[in-house]
Amino acid sequence: MPSGDNMFYEEQEAGHNYYGEFIGKELVEITRKMFPLSSALLTEGIEKRTDDNPFFAETRTFAQCVFGDLEKVKNSDKDPKWLVRRQHRCWSAQYMNMMDVRE
């Protein structure tokens, strides 16, 4: 949690404290540069990971601790891409059902 220093996260032009700008824009940009991973990329090719990677979060052991059997991640509820496709189909079906009701 970013520190607001008892300033209630209010923009203070006189003191040049722009907490909304910092938290809403700058902090987001900084963290995206520090951690350039998307959740979909976390599971892309996960079953092929090895423990040779110097970045611990990209190792097979770490992935197994988080996701379990790596051979079962793809097209499961642990696969962000699969979840999006599934939700898209659900929304499409709901929309089509709404259209049927109106006709």
Image (tube, rainbow, N blue to C red):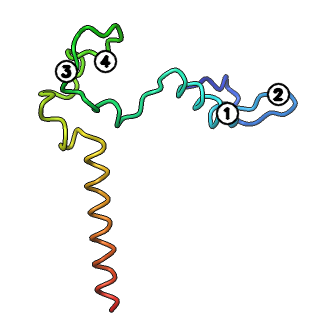
User: From the viewer's perspective, is 3 left or right of 36?
Assistant: right
Give the alpha-carbon distance from disc 3 to disc 2, as whole Å.
45 Å
- Mark before the other along the chain sequence, 3 or 2: 2
Q: Nearer the viewer, mark 3 or mark 4?
A: 4
Residue at x-position 18% and y-position 22%: 64
Give the alpha-carbon distance from disc 3 to disc 1, as whole Å.
39 Å
What residue did someone put label 1 on?
A: 8
- Mark before the other along the chain sequence, 3 or 4: 4
Q: As shown in the figure, which amino acid type bears the numbered disc 2?
A: His
Give the alpha-carbon distance from disc 4 to disc 2, as whole Å.
40 Å
Residue 95 sits in which quadrant? bottom left
What residue did someone put label 2 on?
A: 16
Residue at x-position 65% and y-position 26%: 4
- Mark before the other along the chain sequence, 1 or 4: 1
Give the alpha-carbon distance from disc 3 to disc 4, as whole Å.
12 Å
Q: Does residue 71 lie above or below 80 as drawn?
A: above
Viewer-proximal residue, 33 or 11? Answer: 33
What residue did someone put label 3 on?
A: 65
Residue 11 sits in which quadrant? top right
Q: Nearer the viewer, mark 4 or mark 2?
A: 4
Q: Nearer the viewer, mark 3 or mark 1?
A: 3
Task: Decide: few, some or many residues near mark 1? Use Cα within 10 Å; few <14, some 14-19, many ≥20.
Answer: few
The image shows residue 40 at horizontal and vertical percentages of 34, 37
Q: As shown in the figure, which amino acid type bears the numbered disc 4?
A: Glu
Residue 27 sits in which quadrant? top right
Residue at x-position 25% and y-position 55%: 86
**Element type at marker 3?**
helix
Task: Decide: few, some or many residues near mark 3? Use Cα within 10 Å; few <14, some 14-19, many ≥20.
Answer: few
Q: Nearer the viewer, mark 3 or mark 2?
A: 3
